[in-house]
Image: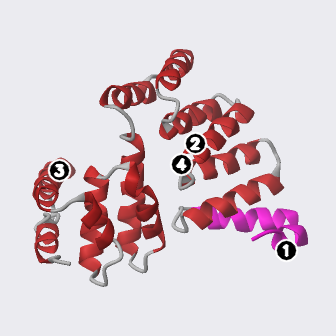
């Protein structure tokens, strides 16, 4: 498998200069990512990127997973999710970011635009009405269910939030965000056993989730021996 060009494209990405302002850095980085995407996707297919995700060369894996985040489809969802367990920390971080990007664009352009619009809405009732319409038009859009679950959580409709998280997971079993969301709901509902099970499963999917290990330990302490000897 030829990787030299892909690695070269990846190594061309800009590095932040000393004392560079956040705005200037963001512009240069975005330009670099656009150049990388254009060059990489012109030369390599998605199937080739997928095969490179397990390449012994760490820069090849980093470049491949970055390319997935910029242009990958749900076809490679499981392969990218496997990179959450990679031995390289940067690959793991890139994989988490790539998955969120892939999940948000896993529908038609119009439905993706509508999801972004609904996420930005500040009026919960208008947003919920919009999600109802969106999900009728795109019943297989897992991220739309997950985002509505977040809205339900914020409005303390925890059981409905759990229901949407479960639907998102049926559509996308790799969705660690939805799995962790179930745990958060059970925490607010004061159901520590159910929360512990949910958080453990979220960590199985993505062992890099910030704060989840600490939450699990706290729940195990609350539950005592039952929490520590329960299902791991």
Asked whether 46 or 207 is in front, the reply is: 46
Answer above or below: position of 7 versus 223. Answer: below
- Labels 3 and 4: the sequence-earlier one: 3
Q: Position of residue 171 (x, y in %)?
A: 56, 44
**Residue appearing at x 75%, y 46% in the figure:** 186
Q: CA distance from mark 3 to mark 1?
A: 47 Å
Q: CA distance from mark 2 to mark 4?
A: 6 Å
Q: Position of residue 10 (x, y in %)?
A: 17, 68
Quadrant location, the N terminus: bottom left
Q: CA distance from mark 1 to mark 2?
A: 29 Å
Q: Which of the two marks, 1 or 2, is nearer to us in this view?
A: 2
Q: CA distance from mark 4 to mark 1?
A: 29 Å
As helix, strand or loop, the secondary structure at mark 3 comes to: helix
Q: Quadrant of residue 13?
A: bottom left
Q: Which of the two marks, 3 or 2, is nearer to us in this view?
A: 2
Tell me the residue that label 4 is attached to: 172
Asked whether 38 or 217 is in front, the reply is: 38
Taken as a whole, is the magenta stretch helix, strand or loop? helix
Q: Position of residue 2 (x, y in %)?
A: 16, 77
The disc label shown at residue 30, or none: 3
**Residue appearing at x 16%, y 66% in the figure:** 15
Residues in magenta? 211-232
As helix, strand or loop, the secondary structure at mark 4 comes to: loop
Number of residues whose C-alpha sits closer than 10 Å to that of mark 1, classed few (under 14), some (14–19) or many (20 or more): few
Tell me the residue that label 2 is attached to: 168
Q: Which of the two marks, 4 or 1, is nearer to us in this view?
A: 4
Find out whether the residues at labels 2 and 4 contact each other: C-beta distance under 8 Å.
yes
Q: CA distance from mark 3 to mark 2?
A: 30 Å
């Amino acid at each position: 498998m030829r990787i030299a060009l892909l690695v070269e494209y990846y190594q061309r990405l800009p590095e932040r200069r000393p004392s560079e302002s956040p705005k200037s850095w963001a512009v240069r980085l975005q330009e670099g990512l656009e150049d990388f995407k254009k060059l990489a996707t012109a030369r390599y297919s998605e199937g080739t990127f997928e095969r490179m995700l397990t390449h012994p060369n760490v820069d090849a894996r980093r470049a491949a997973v970055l390319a997935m985040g910029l242009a990958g489809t749900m076809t490679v969802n499981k392969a990218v999710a496997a990179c959450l367990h990679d031995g390289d920390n940067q690959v793991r971080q890139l994989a988490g970011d790539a998955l969120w990007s892939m999940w948000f664009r896993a529908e038609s352009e119009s439905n993706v635009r509508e999801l972004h619009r609904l996420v930005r809405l500040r009026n919960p009732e208008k947003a919920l009405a919009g999600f109802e319409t969106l999900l009728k038009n795109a019943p297989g859009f897992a991220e739309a269910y997950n985002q509505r679950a977040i809205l339900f959580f914020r409005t303390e409709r925890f059981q409905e939030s759990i229901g949407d998280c479960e639907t998102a997971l049926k559509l996308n079993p790799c969705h660690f965000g939805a799995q962790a969301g179930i745990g958060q709901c059970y925490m607010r509902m004061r159901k520590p056993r159910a929360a512990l099970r949910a958080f453990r499963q979220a960590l199985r999917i993505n062992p890099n989730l910030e704060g989840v290990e600490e939450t699990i330990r706290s729940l195990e302490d609350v539950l005592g021996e039952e929490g520590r000897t329960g299902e791991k």
